[in-house]
Image (cartoon, rainbow, N blue to C red):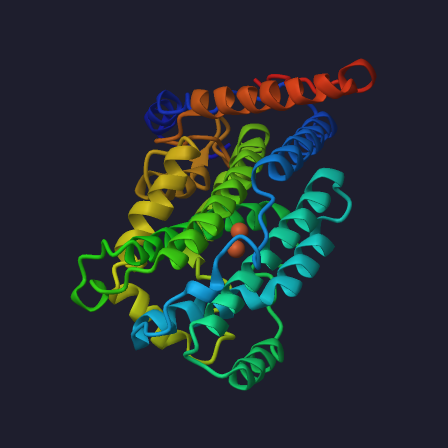
Amino acid sequence: MLSYDRSIVETLEADRPKIPVGLLSRDEKDRLIERGFLALYRWYVDRSQALRNWNPDRDVLWKKIRQDHNYEVNKILEGFFAVEQYVPDYVESIVDLIRKSHGRSHFQIRWGSEESKHADLWHNAVLFSRFRSPEWLRNYMGELRSNTWKLPWEGDPIRMIFYTVFQERATQINYLGMGVIAKGQSKVEQFKDSADPVLVQACKLIAIDEAAHYNFFLEGARLFLYYYPAQALEAMHDVIKYFSMPAGALIPDYNEFSTIVHKAGIYGPREHSRDVIQKALDNLGMASKRLLEEGIRKTRLVPDEDGNLRQTAIFPGLDFQHIEDAVKRMFDRTGKYEAEIGFDEIDPVEFKPAY
Ligand SMILES: [Fe+2]
Ligand SMILES: [Fe+2]
């Protein structure tokens, strides 16, 4: 047996309470996660059809959009258009990754149909604002689509769900920021005269969708965080560390676009860390990025009573009760929907504590 300083273990043990020991088998946890996703998907589709069934042609008065927007506003619209052009790749690669999961894969298809409306909405915005000719836009679209978006985390469904949490939130922040400019409320000199009620409507429709997407992925990420906390926290940490916006590397003039959105006060490092990372961490029960990093480091360093180094579960900053409460609420809410249909009599969705 290795000799070691017992006080180190004692200190670490005292530090340990954040994640208790699990009670459920792997199979049971996987079943609960899968059943949770299915319920969440059903609940989501119901709401999506009832509340967000908008049309990118009819629900925005495109004929009335301003045709005298400045270069920067036009470049922002063009950038939004470009990012949403990779919808076929987003759908194909993610569905391929999670095709065995009923709830997750069907959701992703549904999500793709909503994202395709976003691509069409920005296409209309660019076309009707007359900054570019239809011919130019067709060529640009062809150029964009000659590249294929690839998953930032190949073969890794847990990292991908965390990626989509941060990505949806970031997209929402972008559209909300554009909405502020379109309302004529920007504090940046260049954008003070950019008010455009047509763009206000466009940004509003799309930002509400992005919020719903964020919420779905957030609920899904919490399922992993609750039933597989160590793996989920490591995934969350990696995703934050290496995060970049989708397709940034594929869009030819992306640097100019990101400089403009930064200067416009829409999205830059400050918004990224405050409105995206910290906001998502709050929703995931994690106090801060710093504590997450510290937790990840500690998991790899703890010796057990025999002096063997082993993975443990010390996560300073993780509010585990917050996660459990949120997961319970999700099961409760989606279970009520399922009971309205009658699923509860055949195959009820039920929360089971993991600890
Ligand atoms: Fe979108
Ligand atoms: Fe989205």
Residue 291 image point, x, y percent: 33, 38
In this view, 118 is above or below 249: above
Give the residue at x 56% y 57%.
56
Give 225 or 341, whichever is nearer the viewer: 341
In the picture, measured across the screen, residue 100 lies left or right of residue 74, that is right
Is residue 188 visible to us here?
yes
In this view, 298 is above or below 265: above
Is residue 156 visible to us here?
no
In this view, 20 is above or below 306: above
In the picture, measured across the screen, residue 173 lies left or right of residue 149, that is left
Give the residue at x 66% y 33%.
46
Give 238 or 300, whichever is nearer the viewer: 238
Rendering quarter of residue 352: top right
Give the residue at x 41% y 65%.
65
Residue 204 image point, x, y percent: 43, 48
Rendering quarter of residue 330: top right
Give the residue at x 26% y 64%.
264
Question: In this figure, what is the number of numbered marks?
Answer: 0
Work out which residue is located at the far front of the displayed protein and give it: 63
